[in-house]
Image (tube, coloured by chain):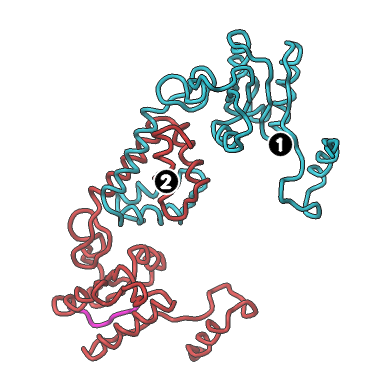
Chain colours: A red, B cyan
């Protein structure tokens, strides 16, 4: 449709998640129009990420070089471990400022239909850490959906017999939410997870 | 939020049109995950576009090197000229297969509030082409919005006195549309532009 290199760029942009053909065209023409140094900064950022970002050999968070920023921070509580599906989930948990322990990234959730079993996740590495580190509590922080729940259940059965405290994050109504608009599953979980009021 | 190069990539992606912070994260993590050669292809496509794509010196369409593919195609009808706002509009017109003439890209539309006057568009170059080429009909194919209509009106006033046939694309109901859902302006234009039925 477009002349050589421009079409190549539209095609490459169209392969990115969430970018349709029209967005790809729009972005390609935007890049065509901006100052060369602005476009080059993007190209270099892509190259940089591929060359410099690695996975932390301990927790499998994104890292630059060896251990990730959290694993190499001595002030973190080494007895608590929060298990998440994705490195982005670490950012979400960190934002709460409620957790001072360390993390373990599974890089996915159990999904037998798509061929994702325990061997495709970083489960073996998680068990290895229990030998090496002084972990006493594990918080299962996978997504509250079918795959995430199945993964949490699987890990709980694996970890409980080892004498660890294994907890799951609470499901319930989001803060600022409205009972009227809550789906019945969430409201059911909120009732199930009710707690004594401190008064 | 993320480690150095990853945050830099998220920031650069977030500067692209239509990419919000969440999309930028999603794309950055996608690029982190794909094979290095796939990410490099995107980076190279960006560099390539900036280095190899130029504007056609005659019609200001995107081109590789000298004249664009349409200007250098001798089979095109040199007497008809379709004036558009943007190179992407050429693709839209070409897809109709209804036009075999050449194009002229204004690179924008009149918009006094944003400081876009005739001098900011390729109007002078359009007038120059009338001297050099055997153009007899000009189709004003700017967008049917406020700025596009103003630009078409301005060009019509400029070009009519030169003895050319100057036409404007029709406004009306889109094919497959529904009278009930048409806005009154479009329906008004459709009535205004009504044509004798061949029967």
Residue name at image x 19 percent, y 60 percent: A67
Q: Position of residue A26 (x, y in %)?
A: 51, 41
Residue A141 in view here: no
- Sort mark 1 into few (<14), some (14-19) or many (20+) by Cα contacts within 10 Å: few
Chain under disc 1: B
Q: Residue furthest top?
A: B131
- Is residue B160 covered in magenta? no
* As drawn, B178 above or below A82: above
In percent of width and height, residue B149 lies at 73, 30
Frontmost residue, B165 versus A53: B165
Image-based side of B89 in relation to B4, left or right: right
Task: Report helix, strand or loop for mark 1.
Answer: loop
Q: Crowding near pointer 2: few (<14 within 10 Å), some, many (20+)?
A: many
A145, A133: nearer the viewer? A145
SS class, disc 2: helix
Q: Which residue is mark 1?
A: B145
Look at the image and tell me whether residue B179 can be seen. yes
Q: Chain of mark 2?
A: A
Return the mark for residue A13: 2
User: Looking at the image, which residue is at 77% across and 41% down?
Assistant: B172
B15 above or below B167?
below
């Amino acid at each position: 449709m477009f002349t050589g290199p421009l079409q190549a760029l539209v095609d490459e942009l169209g392969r990115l998640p969430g970018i349709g053909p029209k967005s790809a065209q729009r972005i390609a023409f935007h890049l065509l129009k901006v100052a060369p140094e602005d476009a080059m900064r993007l190209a270099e950022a892509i190259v940089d990420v591929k060359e410099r970002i690695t996975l932390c050999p301990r927790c499998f968070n994104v890292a630059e070089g060896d251990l990730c920023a959290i694993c190499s921070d001595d002030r973190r509580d080494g007895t608590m471990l929060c298990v998440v599906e994705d490195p982005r989930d670490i950012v979400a948990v960190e934002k709460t400022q409620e957790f001072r322990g360390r993390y373990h990234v599974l890089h996915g959730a159990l999904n037998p239909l798509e061929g994702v079993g325990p061997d495709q996740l970083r489960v073996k590495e998680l068990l290895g850490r229990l030998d090496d580190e002084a972990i006493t509590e594990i918080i299962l922080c996978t997504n509250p959906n079918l795959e995430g729940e199945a993964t949490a259940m699987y890990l709980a059965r694996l970890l409980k017999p080892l004498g660890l405290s294994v907890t799951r994050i609470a499901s319930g109504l989001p803060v600022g939410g409205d009972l009227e608009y809550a789906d019945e599953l969430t409201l059911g979980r909120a009732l199930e997870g009710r707690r004594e009021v401190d008064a």
